């Protein structure tokens, strides 16, 4: 009861303001029931949600996907510009389009390989022969791969260079991997080959360079992606597994956004930092290759056999090197890495589409996905874009027909240059920083709509989990109408929740893997990322979530769900750190922080919307300013708790310096202050 | 018309939400005019404002002032704690008190002189004699000055130390002053005497140390404060002019807030930085003296006569030294500065009082003043506190009698430890950062209510000027009922405004001189500081402003008034900088920034409230993070325009380094982005 009284009280303010204004302006009589009250009172319409879900059409999604993935559409290429026009065309269509759609362009710093001089890895024998060269591009398996616009394999933002040395196998290229290797050999002047995973792409090269490694080769081990399958006859096109010649392209950068304009939109007037001052890109030439080529190199390595945790699924024992074994083809040979990348400032477009809110036009629900791919991008990102276009077609048609208009404004974003480091979405977040921070209730990201597991895969911050649960319960699985997406999901991923009083599906946590990162990590907006094996189920689930967020009278966000995460984090920190902390007379201060949070939650939309913002602290991590979210910022430590505390603790334990223990204490203050602020945001409004 | 349509549209959302909730909860019929609509529709009540102004009682204010200034009440002393109880007692009074009042305590780092070993300045003759010692405390002129709790003169946060050297006169202690002096002598090992003004207190000592000066003496020149009057017979108690023995105490720090806990509230759990890492305090012993003592030293100086702009009102020509003239009493003598300060962490209280808003309890109007003084503080701050207590008594009584309740929540703050660097207000701003940032509409500061000029002296950001004009027109001057405060004000300070279409009073700009600084510079809240010669006129004006902000249906803030300031700043920057900038191919980019701002202003409260926040950029000034306001941050350059651009330009011109010109370009980006964000906040809501 008390909560509802408060709700009534708070909103009364705007209520009568609007009454005053509307009466004044439209001359509505005070004594009859105003008809606009009916219009304005609309809440989520369950019938409309069902109607929407019924209208989701698999054939439309397939046709969207076919068009989107017909040609390679790497950021800023002609293929990309064609998809700009395709999205813009639909969103501006008078019958099925949105209220407003436009391009927004930024001049961004991109990295490309030279088509005429492809990057490669060679084995150089003592006599100067070249007994091996990596494939310059993937084996042509289907017609579309013969398109001359398929970009050759490269590591974006790797420096150019031609380097040579003995080969070593360095597992995943983590700091600890190179440390381990360095006990067995001097790494100076070597070339390291590492598999994807464990550390970020760029981190592998930065770590390697610290140990004197002069060049880096990266490949995708079949253990990590193909369920261990390496046999060509069992990979694409005979299955969906990656073939031996397939190469994972990627952006080798540690942060996100345009590298020359950190914190500001990359407009023509914007100041650009010197290229030499870019942080977090590889210091040494780096090149990705397929596992077929990797096998030829790794299986010839000399030296000790690597630890079992370092072994992958290639058909041999992985030795660590250095150099090749004497009884093989490459005896005495070096490895040579040739990288011919170049950088260029290019104009990249976001396409923005808007459905204006009828009641709260100044509250935004964002729904986005990037548009650019590395090659044809049938899965990443076009499966997500195909879904977004089907959602906008259905909703746009309803709007054009006058049958529906959301309570809040919906902003759709088709981001550019995501593959180069979430550039389009980050520039947008920088460009509209204040407005988005003050007005955005939630961001929904649907990047890859088709994924390995035959179940929903949802990631998000705690406040969004409940609305995803609600939607997932209403969507049928493609396999059976009697099995809901929720029931299927909970089979694969689940946890016991004290708040929900039982088993619930387990949401994944968000890092910086797709375009939600600037909204979550930099602006502090509640975010989610939704994927599923079947496009249609994603369209229905994501659309359902979108409609609930856009139309609900009270926002369906549950900040109370943060309590479980925070309690877990405090418990973990206590178990992992408290002995050493009490030695240092530092207290985690958990009790004082948590008491008031769950008890007096007021379900008021602005509070619901803004509680996530309370976790933003732009001073928390001076060396990674984009990661300003005290709970979800990136973390190096393996202890899953507050990232600042965990990383500072790991450092302090290793150095035992007073200054580093002070940093632990500092990060405890950062967390305590953020949690206090979040709790304070949810307490009685007329109080401090 | 368009604006009002949008207004109606935006607020309709909350409107019907509240309708739904209230109907649901209270069971009010839909077909009759709900009675709560009348309650909730209240706007500013002009009759109530008149009633309030009529009830302001000069005798009450005088009695408040008498009690508050009866004893010295330096921060955290018994005298201060007594005023805590006095304020708390009134605000908790069941008949004249507020809805809620409480102490909020922070453990803050303060600096004090040793009572048993007073700081002093001596002249040491070549034979070891001491022909001069500065007064250890002011001459007792009235009984209350004999109170043993009067703190002896000192420079808070000056390090302890005993240093000796030849005396030099360094004008105001600006960098340029020491540079000038250094053309005539080697300053290493000297003691410098400087007058207040021109540079911050701490800056004088920091500048001096850069030139090798080992000790600093500071005094208040009668030219700067006494209209040049030095004669004891014409100073207090014979007039209100400062007597020769009067010493200005002050905090010698460059930033504000508790020095050991930057950016976080100084609670018991908070991490504290090492004292050696404190930034911006004097590196050399520093001591303030009265102008009587200063005269004895300066009028004996040897060396060249200082430039006319360096001459003050003491009865001699100011020479620059070094050392004393040979034909005087101090021939061949050094000056010795003895400082015995110590630092201590003490518990300092803010007293917070709340009147809950009836309609928008989650929107705050803040009204504050500090409570601590250096000595008795009859003017600074007790004149302001006396006014605040009279305002809270009148409004509290109305609330207790059920006759009035504001639309929005009013939060009164009686801040502690302001004299030590705005500590109480800053810790409060840090403690409630998110909540205050998201919900505060404006902050009113009334520190010194009695000031030199017989007119209103108001400072503020552009959005608050209009509401001060409105209030000032309704208040009579103490001298004549037919002359309004506004009419009197415009005689003294005025400017021509294109927006207002004629002459308007000139508001001063805000720096960091009182407790508004954390709210303006760190949180980006629209702020004002109001003073007047007569207490009663301040109470009426400030109270009138407070009531308008708290009760108006639409907030009486005018962000449109920012346009004039921004245009001035751009014009100034263009005149001062554009030649050199175009040489460097850097554009100020003015045109593109300004076009959209004034045209589509929507007078919506949240937009009105949040536009100031768009100027906050926590990355703009990495070496002064508290100054995050892109327009009002501190500025060293004499060119009155955007501080970041002006200071970066000054540096670039002096060094001609590319890196420094790059910084100019960077700061232009900072400003352009902030202005874009402010404009964007004011544009159509359902758009990006």
Image (spheres, coloured by chain):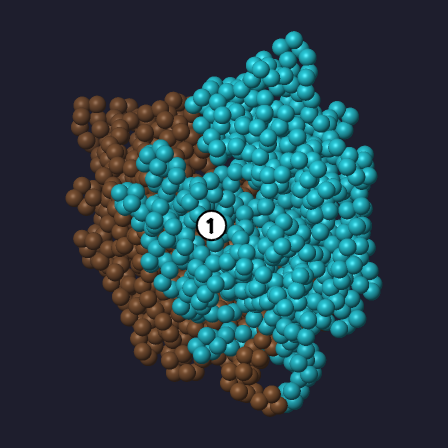
Chain colours: A brown, B cyan
Q: Is B487 in front, or is A684? A: B487
Locate residue B35 relative to residue A443 in the image: left or right.
Answer: right
Q: Quadrant of residue A575?
A: top right
Q: Is residue A194 above or below residue B87?
A: above
Locate residue A159 relative to residue B16 in the image: left or right.
Answer: left
Quarter occupied by the C terminus of chain B: bottom left
- Total labels: the figure holds 1
Residue A38: x and y in percent read 55, 84
Q: Is A255 in front, or is B53? A: B53
Q: Is residue A586 above or below residue B306?
A: below
What's the residue at 19%, 55% (across, down)?
A147
Locate residue B65 relative to residue A641 in the image: left or right.
Answer: right
Residue A352: x and y in percent read 36, 65
Q: Secondary structure at mark 1?
A: loop
What's the residue at 45%, 79% (across, down)?
B1
What's the residue at 55%, 38% (across, down)?
B197
Residue B415: x and y in percent read 69, 49
Residue B18: x and y in percent read 62, 76
Question: Is residue B145 visible to us here?
Answer: yes
Name the residue that disc number 1 marks. B630
- Tell me the chain of label 1: B
């Amino acid at each position: 009861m008390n909560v509802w009284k408060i709700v009534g009280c708070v909103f009364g303010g705007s209520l009568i303001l609007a009454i005053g204004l509307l009466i004044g302006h439209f001359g509505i009589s005070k004594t009859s029931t105003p008809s606009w009250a009916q219009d304005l009172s609309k809440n989520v319409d369950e019938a409309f949600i069902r109607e929407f879900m019924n209208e989701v059409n698999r054939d439309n999604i397939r046709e969207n996907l076919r068009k989107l993935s017909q040609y390679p559409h790497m950021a800023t290429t002609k293929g990309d510009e064609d998809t700009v026009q395709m999205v813009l065309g639909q969103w501006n269509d008078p019958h099925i389009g949105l209220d407003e759609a436009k391009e927004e362009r930024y001049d961004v710093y991109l990295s490309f390989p030279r088509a005429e001089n492809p990057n490669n890895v060679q084995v150089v024998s003592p006599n100067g022969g070249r007994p091996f060269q990596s494939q310059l591009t993937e084996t042509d398996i289907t017609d579309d791969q013969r398109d001359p616009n398929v970009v050759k394999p490269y590591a974006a933002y790797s420096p150019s260079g031609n380097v040579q040395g003995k080969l070593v196998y360095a597992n995943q290229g983590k700091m600890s991997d190179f440390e381990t290797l360095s006990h067995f050999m001097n790494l100076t002047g070597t070339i390291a080959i590492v598999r994807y995973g464990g550390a970020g792409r760029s981190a592998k090269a930065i770590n390697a360079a610290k140990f004197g490694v002069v060049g880096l080769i990266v490949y995708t081990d079949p253990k990590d992606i193909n369920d261990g399958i390496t046999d060509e006859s069992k990979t694409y096109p005979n299955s969906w597994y990656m073939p031996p010649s397939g190469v994972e392209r990627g952006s080798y950068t540690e942060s996100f956004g345009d590298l020359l304009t950190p914190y500001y939109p990359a407009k023509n007037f914007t100041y650009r930092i010197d290229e030499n001052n870019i942080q977090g890109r590889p210091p040494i030439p780096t090149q990705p290759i397929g596992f077929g080529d990797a096998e030829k190199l790794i299986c010839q390595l000399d030296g000790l056999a690597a630890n079992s945790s370092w072994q992958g699924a290639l058909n041999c024992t992985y030795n660590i090197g250095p150099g090749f074994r004497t009884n093989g083809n490459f005896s005495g040979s070096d490895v040579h890495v040739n990288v011919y990348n170049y950088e260029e400032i290019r104009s990249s477009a976001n396409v923005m589409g808007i459905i204006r809110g009828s009641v709260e036009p100044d509250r935004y629900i964002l729904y986005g996905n990037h548009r650019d791919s590395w090659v044809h991008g049938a899965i990443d990102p076009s499966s997500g874009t195909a879904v977004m276009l089907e959602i906008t077609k259905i909703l746009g048609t309803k709007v054009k027909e006058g049958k529906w208009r959301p309570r809040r404004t919906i902003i759709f974003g088709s981001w550019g240059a995501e593959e180069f480091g979430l550039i389009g979405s980050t520039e947008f977040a920088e460009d509209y920083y204040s407005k988005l921070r003050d007005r955005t209730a939630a961001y929904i990201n649907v990047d890859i709509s088709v994924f390995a597991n035959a179940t929903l895969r949802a990631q998000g911050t705690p406040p969004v989990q409940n609305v995803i649960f609600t939607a997932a319960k209403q969507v049928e699985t493609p396999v059976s109408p009697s099995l809901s997406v929720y029931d299927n999901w909970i089979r694969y991923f689940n946890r016991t929740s004290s708040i929900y009083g039982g088993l619930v599906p387990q949401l994944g946590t968000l890092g910086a893997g797709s375009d939600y990162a600037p909204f979550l990590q930099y602006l502090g907006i509640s975010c989610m990322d939704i994927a599923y094996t079947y496009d249609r189920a994603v369209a229905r689930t994501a659309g359902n979530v979108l409609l609930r967020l856009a139309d609900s009278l009270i926002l369906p966000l549950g900040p109370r769900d943060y309590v479980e995460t925070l309690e877990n984090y405090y418990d973990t920190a206590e178990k992992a750190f408290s002995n050493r902390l009490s030695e240092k007379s530092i207290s985690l201060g958990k009790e004082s922080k948590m008491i008031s949070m769950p008890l007096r939650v007021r379900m008021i939309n602005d509070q619901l919307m803004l509680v996530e913002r309370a976790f933003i602290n732009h001073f928390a991590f001076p060396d990674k300013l984009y990661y300003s979210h005290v709970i979800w910022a990136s973390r190096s430590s393996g202890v899953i708790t507050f990232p600042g505390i965990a990383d500072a603790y790991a450092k302090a334990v290793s150095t035992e310096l007073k200054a580093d223990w002070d940093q632990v204490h500092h990060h405890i203050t950062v967390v305590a202050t953020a949690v206090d602020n979040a709790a304070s945001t949810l307490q009685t409004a007329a109080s401090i």
